[in-house]
Image (cartoon, rainbow, N blue to C red):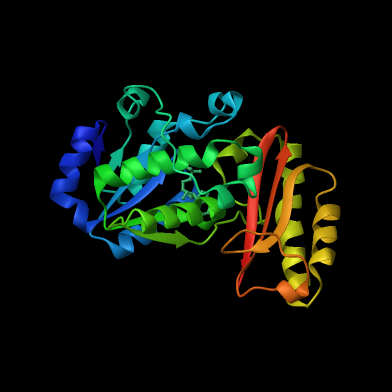
């Protein structure tokens, strides 16, 4: 497995292999969720490149950035075992040689919803790094998890509007056997917090059942609120999966509905969602 640490080498790789490459951008501390993207990329491309970069531009909370788990040797071993061809793991100065630029791409309507409301600047930082990584590597396909559904939606829009040649692929959310959505941040949970965190997925599954059985949006909201009552909840929403606008009643049922939650457990911010077709 080749290790690439500079933008120049990333561009060289692009010139030689970009057109046959599937790309999986990550912030490291990898788990089965990340590996599911790698597997999909390997099935659909001759080469797979993974990036590991904890992007400071997308952290609105400096404490969260500082505590973000890092273990590059463990990540490399997992990627090697998964058959990845190259890993791009640049130092911070390589990505932002002049500091994080104030340049922003913004979709104001989408960005003020769900995670955007409590994390100002987060999605602007995500779009900046994904834009740059895709420019440098020029992959045929890039793989993103629906765990970060709002992020996927924004990246998909950016790729369309800026006419990227890279195809943006959304991949299913991967869970632990008890339902908890896999996340690098889960390692920061205490044993008690790990149990409390199950309230997110349980509440979502319950709400999805209610939805399928024809209950109203108001009933779903109150079920979500009571299911998550023990947690400091950031949001618990039922929305149109394309616009992320909250739904108000049964009459506004959409072809695709997203039920999404964010809450703090042990001061760790966790997100989860269920997408209903
Ligand atoms: P991160 O390292 O958390 O920035 O995530 C890198 C990529 O992996 C993003 O596209 C995430 O949506 C995806 N990802 C993270 N957790 C999961 C999961 N549990 N299931 C599927 N994809 C995930």
Q: Nearer the viewer, residue 229 or 158?
A: 158
Identify which residue is drawn at 36% across, 44% down: 131
Q: Position of residue 162 (x, y in %)?
A: 34, 53
Say which quadrant the C terminus sits in: bottom right
Determine the residue located farthest toward the front in the rendered image: 108
In this picture, is 196 found above or below 259? above
With 39 as the anchor, is 211 left or right in this view? right
Say which quadrant the N terminus sits in: top left
With 136 as the anchor, is 208 left or right in this view? right
Residue 161 appears anywhere in the view: yes
Residue 94 occupies quadrant? top left
Residue 68 occupies quadrant? top right
How many dots with numbers?
A: 0
In this picture, is 226 found above or below 197? below
Q: Position of residue 115 (x, y in %)?
A: 62, 45
In this picture, is 152 found above or below 264? below
Residue 26 occupies quadrant? top left
């Amino acid at each position: 497995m080749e290790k690439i640490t500079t933008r120049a080498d990333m561009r060289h790789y692009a010139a030689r292999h970009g057109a046959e490459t599937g790309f999986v951008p990550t912030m490291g501390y990898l788990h089965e969720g990340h590996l599911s993207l790698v597997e999909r990329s390997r099935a659909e491309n001759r080469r797979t490149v993974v990036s590991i970069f904890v992007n400071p531009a997308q952290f609105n909370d400096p404490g969260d950035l500082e505590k973000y788990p890092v273990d590059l040797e463990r990540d490399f071993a997992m990627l090697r075992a998964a058959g990845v061809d190259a890993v791009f793991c640049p130092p911070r100065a390589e990505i932002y040689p002049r500091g994080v630029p104030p340049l922003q791409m913004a979709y104001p309507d989408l960005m003020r919803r769900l995670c955007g409301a409590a994390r100002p600047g987060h999605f602007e930082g995500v779009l900046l790094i994904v834009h740059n990584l895709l420019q440098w590597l020029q992959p045929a396909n890039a793989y993103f998890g629906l765990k970060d559904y709002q992020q996927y939606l924004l990246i998909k829009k950016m790729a369309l509007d800026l006419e990227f040649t890279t195809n943006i692929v959304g991949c299913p959310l991967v869970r632990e056997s008890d339902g908890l959505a896999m996340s690098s941040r889960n390692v920061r949970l205490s044993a008690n917090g790990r149990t409390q965190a199950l309230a997110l997925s349980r509440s979502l599954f319950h709400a999805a059942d209610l939805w399928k059985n024809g209950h109203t949006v108001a009933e779903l909201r109150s079920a979500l609120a009571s299911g998550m009552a023990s947690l400091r909840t950031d949001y618990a929403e039922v929305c149109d999966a394309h616009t992320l606008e909250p739904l108000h009643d049964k009459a506004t049922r959409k072809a695709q509905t997203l039920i999404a939650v964010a809450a703090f457990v042990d001061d760790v911010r966790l997100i989860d969602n269920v997408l209903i077709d």
